[in-house]
Amino acid sequence: MIIKVRYFGQLQEVTGKSEEHFELTLDTTASLRRFLKTLYPKLGTMNFKIAQDNKITSDSSPLKGQLIDLLPPFSGG
Amino acid sequence: MEIRYQRHIQLKEIGIEGQKKIRNSKVLVVGAGGLGCPAMQYLTASGIGTLGIIDPDVVTLTNLQRQILFKEKDLGRNKAQSAKKHLQKLNTEVTIQAFPFALTHENAAEIIGEFDLVIDGTDNFYTRYLISDQCVLLNKVMIYGALFKFEGQVAVFNYKNGPTYRCLFPLPPKIGEIPNCSEIGVLGVVPGIIGVYQATEALKVILELGGILSGKLLTVNLLTHRNTVLDFDKNQQEIDKIKKQGKPIPIENQDCFLDFEVSLTQLSSKEKIKWIDVREEDELPRVTHLNPINHSTALDTLLESNKKIVAFCQTGMRSKIFVQKLKNKGIENCFSLKEGAAELKKWNQKSQV
């Protein structure tokens, strides 16, 4: 399955990208999180939510979305 | 009222009835900064009944690049009080209350309790979780906004028992994980736009209009114009945790909130500083020539002092609590020394040489 992953906020700085495509088959969003943390070790310590097709899901959710958004909390005000 | 708010009243979605709802509303803005200022300007112009402004900080030169409510002559003055002064000129019909101190776990229930909804214009997670928890406990709506460089996030929490900030981000970021307010740059217009989004959502809640960002996170990127609305669910467990506790749960990460701590390396011996020893009289070493005072009786005299106030103790813990109390009393130019009395004594001896 081809998925598009979009990075928000400081995750763009960690990955050096605003978005990218992957062809992979993974069972849950937790697996995707592990995959991305291996690819970008700096993500390992970061706190972010994963949305699939515009819906923020928990880590135990099956990975079935084609548009994945990674969202860290923002602090500035 | 009819003429001033004619453009509102002309809208069939608002009308006279809607304008009355606006006039009867009470909005608290926490943080009179990049987000809070533009939100307050539009809310004041819209004719809300009562506006509360809470902020312990003073206007600094770096604020003026984006906090366009303030003028150069406000430099060094408390933000809540300065904002009140300018906003009152914009609309004398609005009752404006300035709280020139920090929102804390001690005062949050009382202050938030007086308002219908809270605009989160803070720049730190500590206060943001405090607002969220307190809004859950008092059943108030929280209008969230935050930013990072060219991006912003907006959402409405606890709307008709909807999801809260903890439902979206149950895990507070670890210390140092997210750059804090003063560490990152921001294009001046970005908080302006996000703050106006917050004012828009506040008015929609007051007017009971549709399309409120409840259970939805709006993300805005002003560089790419990639804007997204993401749905998220309520997490009843997170909400019950707060309700069971009966009071807000402080998070460990106090990021910007503790910016009032100061280290000896940040101080100059040439600066005029009023030192306050918050230890008991028999604790050693004494730093005698630095005018230690009896801190239980000295608060009133401090109010009259224009000098920078730095409190110290053995380890920097008690002085932190003491300074928080001063801040709550509206004393602005006060700091807590990170080091203890022993280091201060050494520093002082060195600077005498």
Image: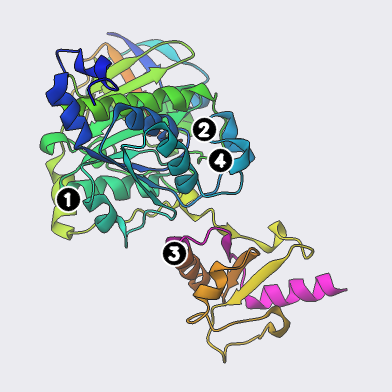
- Distance from disc 1 to disc 2, alpha carbons, whole Å, reads 30 Å
- Distance from disc 4 to disc 2, alpha carbons, whole Å, reads 14 Å
In the displayed structure, B220 sits above or below B305; it is above
- Distance from disc 2 to disc 3, alpha carbons, whole Å, reads 25 Å
Which residue type does callout 3 highlight?
Answer: Lys
Marked residue chain, label 1: B
Task: Name the residue at 34% across, 39% down.
Answer: B120
Graded by Cα atoms within 10 Å as few (under 14), some (14 to 19) or many (20 or more), the crowding at tag 2 reads many
Marked residue chain, label 3: B
Question: Which mark is nearer the camera, 1 or 2?
Answer: 2
Which residue type does callout 2 highlight?
Answer: Gln
**Quadrant assignment, res B19:** top left
Same chain, marks 2 and 3? yes
Where does label 3 land, which residue? B329
Q: Residue furthest top?
A: A2
Mark found first going from the N terminus, 4 or 2: 2
Which residue type does callout 4 highlight?
Answer: Ser
Mark found first going from the N terminus, 1 or 2: 2
Where does label 4 land, which residue? B182
Question: Which mark is nearer the camera, 1 or 4?
Answer: 1
